[in-house]
Image: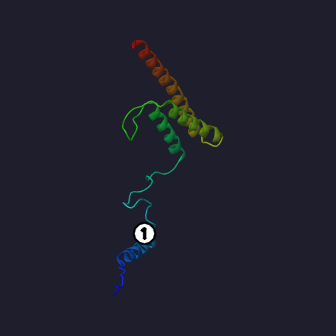
């Protein structure tokens, strides 16, 4: 006597997929706009900040300042000195200045040149302090 094998199919997943597909095709906002992009929990992928030249410059300035130990890293809230990363951020600002030369408004160009000068001076001063501190610790340790 052979028993026929039973195949059990769960129909719930099909209903769930159909509901998700229908929900994805319909805008979820009353104004008819598409819902903001984000993950499954509804967290937006990008902050509600308008992209601009100033934001681009500020991004690299912030990276340089964090790498120079002048402001805490947002993830760890710790100060640290990373000269290679600081140099990279300053170099990126120099590339931006070079590539946008003649295309910036006077106040944008002046601000970019001023921040570059300040970062270069801070890099030299902090590097010298770090070198002096390293030299001092070598002298004190027998």
Horizontal relation, residue 20 to residue 58: left or right: left
Vertical order, 21 against 93 (above or below): below
Vertical order, 4 against 30 (above or below): below
Crowding around mark 1 (Cα neighbors within 10 Å: few <14, some 14 to 19, many 20+) is: few
Q: Residue at x 57, y 33 (%)?
A: 113
Point out residue 16 in the picture as x, y percentages from the top left corner: 37, 74
Horizontal relation, residue 29 to residue 101: left or right: left
Task: Label 1: state its secondary structure.
Answer: loop
Point out residue 38 in the picture as x, y percentages from the top left corner: 42, 59
> Is the N terminus in the top left, top right, bottom left or bottom right quadrant?
bottom left
Quadrant of the rendered structure where residue 15 is? bottom left
Nearer to us in this view, 112 or 107: 112
Q: Residue furthest front?
A: 1
Q: Residue at x 49, y 24 (%)?
A: 127
> Is the C terminus in the top left, top right, bottom left or bottom right quadrant?
top left
Quadrant of the rendered structure where residue 8 is? bottom left
Q: Residue at x 39, y 76 (%)?
A: 14
Vertical order, 41 against 58 (above or below): below
Point out residue 25 in the picture as x, y percentages from the top left corner: 46, 73
Quadrant of the rendered structure where residue 66 is? top left
Q: Residue under label 1, please give it.
A: 31
């Amino acid at each position: 006597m052979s028993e026929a094998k039973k195949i059990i199919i769960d129909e719930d997943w099909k209903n769930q997929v159909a509901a998700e597909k229908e929900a994805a095709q319909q805008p979820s906002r009353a104004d008819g706009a598409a819902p903001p992009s984000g993950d499954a929990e509804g967290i937006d992928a990008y902050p509600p900040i308008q992209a601009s030249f100033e934001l681009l410059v500020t991004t690299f300035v912030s990276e340089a300042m964090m790498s120079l130990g002048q402001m805490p890293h947002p993830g760890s809230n710790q100060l640290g000195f990373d000269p290679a990363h600081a140099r990279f951020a300053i170099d990126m600002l120099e590339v931006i200045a070079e590539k946008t030369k003649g295309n910036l408004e006077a106040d944008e160009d002046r601000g970019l040149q001023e921040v570059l000068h300040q970062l270069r001076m801070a890099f030299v001063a902090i590097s010298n302090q770090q070198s002096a501190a390293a030299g001092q610790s070598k002298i004190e340790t027998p």
